[in-house]
Image: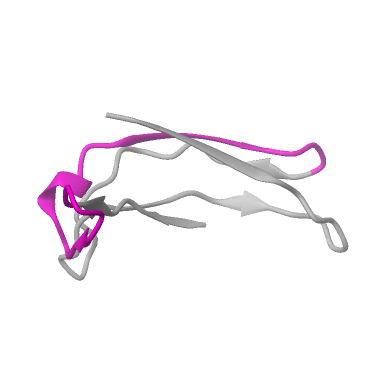
């Protein structure tokens, strides 16, 4: 699973590729029967875009888990 943190200006307009997207922490949970790895803080990815992090998930065939993501700075 990939997570992208995006920043909005005071008017609610997305600020493209803002460095303010970096440094956020994500705490993820997934419903029983599936697993989700811990995520690191966001960092610049290999293509130089801000605000991305990834985590491995495992979902059994036929299940429909719910993923919850909590973010903090």
Tell me which residue sits at (23%, 52%) in the image: 8
- The relative height of residue 30 versus residue 55 in the rendered view (above or below) is above
Q: Quadrant of the C terminus?
A: top left
Up-down: is 23 above or below 2? Answer: above
Farthest residue in the bottom direction?
A: 47
Outermost residue to the top: 72
Q: How is the image coloured?
A: one colour
Nearer to us in this view, 54 or 31: 31
Q: Residue furthest left?
A: 19
The part of the image, by quadrant, that contains residue 28 is top right
Q: How far across and how far down the image is residue 36, in percent?
A: 61, 42
Q: What residue is at 22 percent from the left and 65 percent from the top?
A: 46
- Residue 49: percent from the left, percent from the top? 19, 64
Residue 65, position as x, y percentages in the image: 76, 49
**Is-magenta flag for residue 24?**
yes
Residue interval drawn in magenta: 9-33
Q: Kindly identify the residue that appears in the image at 80 percent across and 37 percent down.
A: 32
Left or right: residue 71 compared with residue 57: left
- Location of residue 31 in the rendering, given as x and y in whole percent from the top left corner: 75, 39
Find out whether residue 27 is within the magenta segment.
yes
């Amino acid at each position: 699973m990939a997570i992208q943190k995006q920043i909005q200006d005071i008017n609610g307009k997305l600020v493209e590729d803002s460095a303010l997207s970096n440094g956020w922490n994500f705490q993820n949970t997934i419903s029983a029967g599936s697993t989700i790895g811990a995520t690191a803080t966001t960092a610049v990815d290999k293509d130089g875009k801000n605000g991305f992090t990834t985590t491995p998930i495992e979902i059994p065939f036929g299940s429909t888990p719910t993923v919850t993501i909590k973010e903090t700075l």
